[in-house]
Image (cartoon, rainbow, N blue to C red):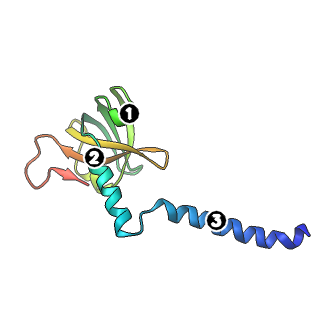
Amino acid sequence: MLLKLSPILALLLAFSGTAVAAAEQPTTPAEQAKLASAESSLPLIDGEVKKVDKDAGKLTIKHGPITNLGMPAMTMVFRVKDAAMLDQVKSGDAIRFSADTVRGTLTVMRLERVGATAGNTQAN
């Protein structure tokens, strides 16, 4: 009996993983609007870019306290929500950013260079 159930069990497990992956992404306009609203309510944190790692899609940032994550001031590595953010900053840039946990990973959700020229102030 176990042999007869194995293909069925394999099929169920395969589809359950697909359902979980699909559930992580907002698919309807209402879900996308809810996500955008949540992102815009995140606090902006003062920081300084210490390193840009385009290959890994990460920024090293020396930052102030991140209240929504209960994190004190420190220097640490973050993933970025959008790889284009990595082209907007360089090591030594003063920034303001918001961060949140996305699928268990600390992620920069919004990024602004401080003192940047109009038209190139934000990457999100």
Residue at mark 3 to residue at mark 1: CA–CA distance? 35 Å
Local secondary structure at mark 2:
loop
Local secondary structure at mark 3:
helix
Residue at mark 2 to residue at mark 1: CA–CA distance? 22 Å
Q: Nearer the viewer, mark 2 or mark 1?
A: 2
Q: Position of residue 99 (x, y in %)?
A: 34, 42
Marker disc for residue 41: 2
The amino acid pointed to by label 2 is Ser
Quarter holding residue 16 = bottom right
Q: Residue furthest right?
A: 1
The amino acid pointed to by label 3 is Ser
From the viewer's perspective, is 56 left or right of 61? right
The quadrant of the rendering that contains the N terminus is bottom right
- Residue placed most toward the observer, 32 or 11: 32
Quarter holding residue 62 = top left
From the viewer's perspective, is 22 left or right of 76? right
The amino acid pointed to by label 1 is Met
Q: Position of residue 25 (x, y in %)?
A: 45, 62
Q: Position of residue 74 (x, y in %)?
A: 35, 27
Q: Position of residue 26 (x, y in %)?
A: 41, 63
Label 2 Cα crowd, 10 Å radius (few <14 / some 14-19 / many 20+): few
The residue pinned by badge 1 equals 76
Marker disc for residue 16: 3
- Residue placed most toward the observer, 84 or 22: 22
- Residue placed most toward the observer, 120 or 2: 2
Q: Earlier in the sequence, mark 2 or mark 3?
A: 3
